[in-house]
């Protein structure tokens, strides 16, 4: 049971959660925001009390202020639910690791943790298995909180690929009707023009008014037609270049393609292509993608061969996913494997693409 004041504070805290369900803002900032925007003068102690109520909500870990607090909240919930015994080994060891060895844990320094707690290999494996069951992003499992992550997207293009590999597309107009100038205005304009000779001042003003409105309407209709034309020629150019992807859905088949390539093919300005590709979506046989998905930079090898950076990244991600997790590959080793696969890229390029893919260094990939 909450007071009206607690309810308002709680709603504001929920609105302040990030996509992972964590509260990244400090309570002092939230206290200032509540005072400025809602006229609620709440102390950080009062906010902390309400936050504890929020942290008791499902899923476990919601409302935590850090990854450490998030995992510890989930550990405590397991005890409350009777999954773990507070006096049992799992709780004691995992609570100690997350409390006193959290830095070593995040850096996967399990050898250090094992030595400090005198754990056997079997105990380390069992603890790792249980810790992996904890969720570092509790908000991601909530349909409501996912609003910003899993937003509803209405595609602007419907791209169809038949079994013979023929690719066609259409603009998705939704429920937008065909636009026409109102017949009443056209008739009014025609009537005034026919009676020009006997017009008084009031009639002339009405004519100018009607003409201005008709011109504006026609200008708007023309702008919509021009926009449709821009969208059509842009999508056609993208399909012409990336036809292989639309036929088989393999991301590795995306060719190097930049905004200038589409601008050259369509005769449109690069800024126009940029705007279209940033806000428009295409529904394909393989999923719905923002147009910017189809763009990829190129990488030129020492032999002068031009390759798609997207294709290289897909191959690199695959190599890392299939590596032996007990002996993950260093960037040097990854460069050698990539060369054997036909991607002769330097170690520093491997490091750069690995970081862009959000994959950590070998030491942190070790399990």
Image (cartoon, grey):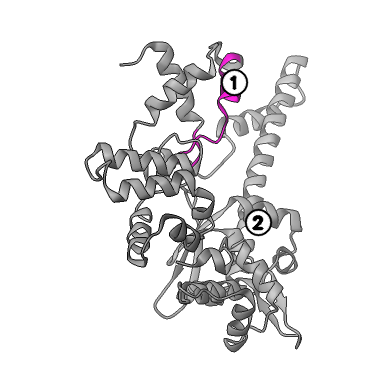
Secondary structure of the residue carrying tag 1 is helix
- The magenta span reads 17-35
| The quadrant where residue 49 appears | top left
Q: Image check: 96 left or right of 343?
A: left
**Which one is in front, 279 or 172?**
279
Q: In the visual, does 196 lie left or right of 10? A: right
For the point 40% across and 17% down, the residue is 7
Q: Position of residue 38 (x, y in %)?
A: 55, 14
Task: Say which of 137 and 332 sits in front.
Answer: 332
Q: Which residue is mark 1?
A: 33
Which numbered dot is residue 230? 2
When the figure is inspected, residue 117 is found, relative to residue 195, above or below; the finding is: below
Per the image, label 2 sits on a secondary structure element best described as helix
- Inter-mark Cα distance, 1 to 2: 44 Å
At a point 59% along the width and 66% down the height, the residue shown is: 361
At which x and y percent is residue 245? 52, 73
First in sequence: mark 1 or mark 2? 1
């Amino acid at each position: 049971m909450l007071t009206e004041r607690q309810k308002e504070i709680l709603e504001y805290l929920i609105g302040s959660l990030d996509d992972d369900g964590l509260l990244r803002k400090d309570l002092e900032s939230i206290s200032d925001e509540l005072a400025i925007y809602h006229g609620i003068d709440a102390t950080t102690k009062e906010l902390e009390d309400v936050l504890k109520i929020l942290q008791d909500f499902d899923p476990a870990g919601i409302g935590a202020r850090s990854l450490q607090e998030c995992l510890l909240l989930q550990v405590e919930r397991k005890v409350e639910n009777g999954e773990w015994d507070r006096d049992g080994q799992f709780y004691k060891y995992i609570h100690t690791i997350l409390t006193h060895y959290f830095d070593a844990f995040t850096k996967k320094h399990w050898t250090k943790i094992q030595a400090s707690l005198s754990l056997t290999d079997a105990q380390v494996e069992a603890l790792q298995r249980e810790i992996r069951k904890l969720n570092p992003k509790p908000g991601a499992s909530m349909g409501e909180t996912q609003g910003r992550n899993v937003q509803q997207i209405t595609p602007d293009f419907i791209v169809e690929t038949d079994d013979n590999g023929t690719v066609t597309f259409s603009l998705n107009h939704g429920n937008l009707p065909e636009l026409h100038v109102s017949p009443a205005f056209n008739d009014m304009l025609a009537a005034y023009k026919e009676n020009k000779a006997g017009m008084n001042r009031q009639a002339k003003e009405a004519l100018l008014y009607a003409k201005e409105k008709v011109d504006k309407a026609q200008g708007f209709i023309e702008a919509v037609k021009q926009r449709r034309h821009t969208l059509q020629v842009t999508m056609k150019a993208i399909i012409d270049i990336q036809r292989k992807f639309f036929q088989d859905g393999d991301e590795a088949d995306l060719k190097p393609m930049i905004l200038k390539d589409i601008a050259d093919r369509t005769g449109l300005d690069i800024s126009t292509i940029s705007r279209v590709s940033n806000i428009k979506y295409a529904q394909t046989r393989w999923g719905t993608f923002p147009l910017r998905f189809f763009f990829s930079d190129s990488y030129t090898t020492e032999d002068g061969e031009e390759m798609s950076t997207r294709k290289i990244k897909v191959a690199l991600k695959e190599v890392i996913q299939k590596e032996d997790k007990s002996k993950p590959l260093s960037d040097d080793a990854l460069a050698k494997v990539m060369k054997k696969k036909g991607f002769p890229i330097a170690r520093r390029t491997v490091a750069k693409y690995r970081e862009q893919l959000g994959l950590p260094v070998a030491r942190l990939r070790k399990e």
